[in-house]
Amino acid sequence: MPVNFDLHDLIAFRAAAELANFRKAAEAVHISQPAFSRRIDKLEQALGVRLFERTTRRVTLTAVGREFARRVGAMLDDLDETLLTVRGVGTARMGEVNIACVPSTVYYYLSDVIHRYRERYPKLRVRIFDAGANEVLAAVARGEADFGLNFIGGSEPGIEFRLLLEERFVAACRRDHPLAKMRKATWHDLAGHDFISVAKSSGNRLLLDQALAQVSGRPQPIYEAQHVTTLLGLVEAGLGVAAVPSLAMPGPEHPLLVSVPLSDPVVTRRIGLIRRQGRRLSPEAQQLYDFLAAMKKASRPRAPRPARG
């Protein structure tokens, strides 16, 4: 029986199977949506089966399509690895890796690790999608990122979570703020000052709300923002104080900002590598994933240091 489809048709099929949307899949393989639809039609006609159930808003795999997607995915992964080896790319570490991460992990963890990695493999290209925790989780689950750095995902079905580090929340304030003279502070101490918080849609806000549910006299925000990095900008401007993960804080050499450990209770979050279960990473992505995992002991967050005197 002659084969009436080609490699491009299989690549298009895998994109549609992973993204469950023809428009996004067409963009992912860099062709127009009509041309993409023709490829899928051609593949279904050649196989004599229906691979997708289509609606106006979404496409889903049929039972046959799910099995075909599993086999095609394994075959294309093997082909990618073979081509990389033949071209010598596996040794030179050329290629591209897509990482999704919460912004606070970029400045004082991921950037340092990638810098060390590029010293060994300078030809690797890394694309970073920095977004909220829920968006990072979704990007990994949909296959839009090879893997991610996040503080949620450990209990999500279909997601593998590999712990890297655990960090505590600290009070962020200016060096000229009264809190800066304290060696440690309680959540009740924060309530006596203008408090800046991430919005309720933030994963950090959900974590804090759950941890402080039974705390009386907890601080109530008068300003809200979407990202921790924005909070630090508002704190630096003198608009108040904030509770942020220690990983998000600049070092003790920062001219304006200082962190004070928070207690009663101590609230922590767990940062880990997340990846989709059962998905085989490309050799470049696997190498960087393993490098990040191996660097966890050498890249733990700094202990918060209050200002002197």
Image (spheres, helix red, strand yellow):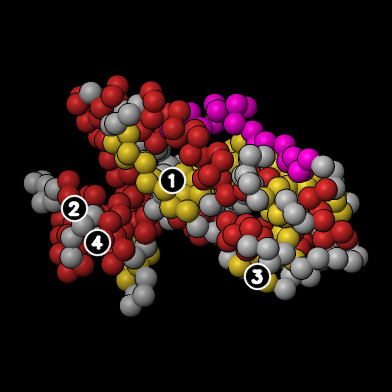
Q: Which residue is denoted by mark 1 in the rendering?
A: 99
The percent position of residue 76, horizontal first and vertical second, equals 27, 40
What kind of element bears circle 3?
A: strand
Q: Main secondary structure of the magenta part?
A: loop
Nearest to the eye among marks 3 and 1: give it. Answer: 3
**Above/below status of 74 relative to 196:** above
Looking at the rendered structure, the secondary structure element under dot 4 is: helix
The answer to whether 213 is drawn above or below residue 90 in the figure is below
- Would residue 126 be counted in the magenta stretch? no
How far apart are labels 3 and 2 at the CA level? 47 Å
User: Which residue occupies 35% across, 36% down?
Assistant: 282
Q: Distance between the Cα atoms at labels 4 and 2? A: 11 Å
Q: Horizontally, is 4 left or right of 82 in the view?
A: left
Which is more toward the observer, 123 or 145?
Answer: 123
Give the residue at the far bottom of this rendering: 56
First to last magenta residue range: 287-308
The residue pinned by badge 4 equals 26
For residue 153, side relative to residue 242 (left or right): left
Going from the N terminus, do you reach mark 4 or mark 1 first? 4
Amino acid residing under circle 4: Ala
Q: Residue at x 37, y 59 (%)?
A: 19
Q: Which mark is residue 123?
A: none
